Image (tube, helix red, strand yellow):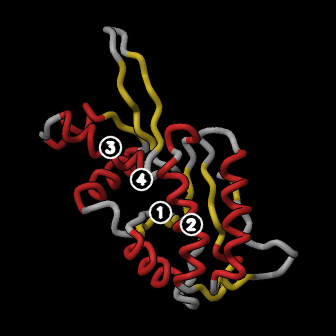
Amino acid sequence: MRLISLLENKEKFIDLVGRRQTVPMKERIIAVIESAPKGTIFYFDFNEVREVNGSGIHEIVVKPLQWLYDNYKSHDKFLVLKNLSVEFDHLYNIQITCNKEKVTILAQAENSYEVIGSKAGNAHIDLLNLVYSRKQVTASELASLLDKKHTLIATHLNRLYEYRLLNREEEQLQEGGRQYVYHSLF
């Protein structure tokens, strides 16, 4: 994973409050993401952040996510959050903004993760949990495990990939054809 630091001038921390300060940060963040190689997984370390509000989260989290959603076919990159603070209500503020804007992002904790935002529904989150517990799966494996139709599972996994919650790689089958192998981001 590659850190995108939210600090610019060797500060010890930053507040993500308001658009005036965060719009230039958003532009810098998108430029960093755009110039990186395909498959790069970026993260923001919220140990660098104190206060946040909806405007700041909209610029720093939502707009880069929307850029990733719009450009996943050509750029195939990912963004996660780390070290959200209870003291500064990071999760609460990010959740409200992500729900309002219909985006979803993963927040990585020490030995777990949390799905933030309402874009992924309960069925998607259940599949996501299975993939993360197994680290990698195919739609065929999950369809067999869950006794569901392959096309249904493949559609859900593809949607999680488009939401930038899973990585995938194409695998050629010996008997001909191809399949995707889906991977957790961490």
Distance, label 4 to label 3, CA atoms, is 10 Å
4 or 3: mark nearer the eye = 4
Question: Regarding mark 3 in the picture, which secondary structure is present there?
Answer: helix
Q: Amino acid at mark 2?
A: Leu
**Which numbered disc flags the more N-terminal residue, 4 or 3?**
3
Q: Residue furthest top?
A: 175
- Residue 183 placed where, x, y %? 45, 41
User: Residue beneath label 4, please?
Assistant: 163
Residue linked to disc 3: 157
Q: Estimate the spatial distance between the alpha carbons at disc 1 and disc 3, rounded to whole Å.
A: 16 Å
Q: Is residue 182 above or below residue 95?
A: above
> Which amino acid lies under the numbered mark 1 shown in the image of this protein?
Leu
Lateral position of residue 85 relative to residue 158, left or right: right
Pick out the residue farthest to the right.
10
Mark 4 or 2, nearer chain start: 2
Number of residues whose C-alpha sits closer than 10 Å to that of mark 2, classed few (under 14), some (14–19) or many (20 or more): many
Q: Earlier in the sequence, mark 2 or mark 3?
A: 2
The earlier-in-sequence mark between 1 and 3 is 1
Q: Earlier in the sequence, mark 4 or mark 1?
A: 1
Q: Are the residues tagged 2 and 1 within 8 Å (C-beta)? A: yes
Q: Position of residue 108 (x, y in %)?
A: 52, 64
Distance of label 2 from label 1 (alpha carbons): 6 Å
* Residue at figure coordinates x 44%, y 26% from the top left: 170
What residue did someone put label 2 on? 81
Q: Mark 3 belongs to which amino acid?
A: Leu
Residue 121, image x and y in percent? Answer: 27, 62
User: Along the polypeptide, which appears first: circle 2 or circle 1?
Assistant: 2
Which numbered marker is on residue 106?
1
Image height of 28 relative to 68, above or below: below
Evaluate if marks 4 and 2 touch, with contact meaning CB atoms under 8 Å apart. no
Taking 39 as reference, is 160 left or right? left
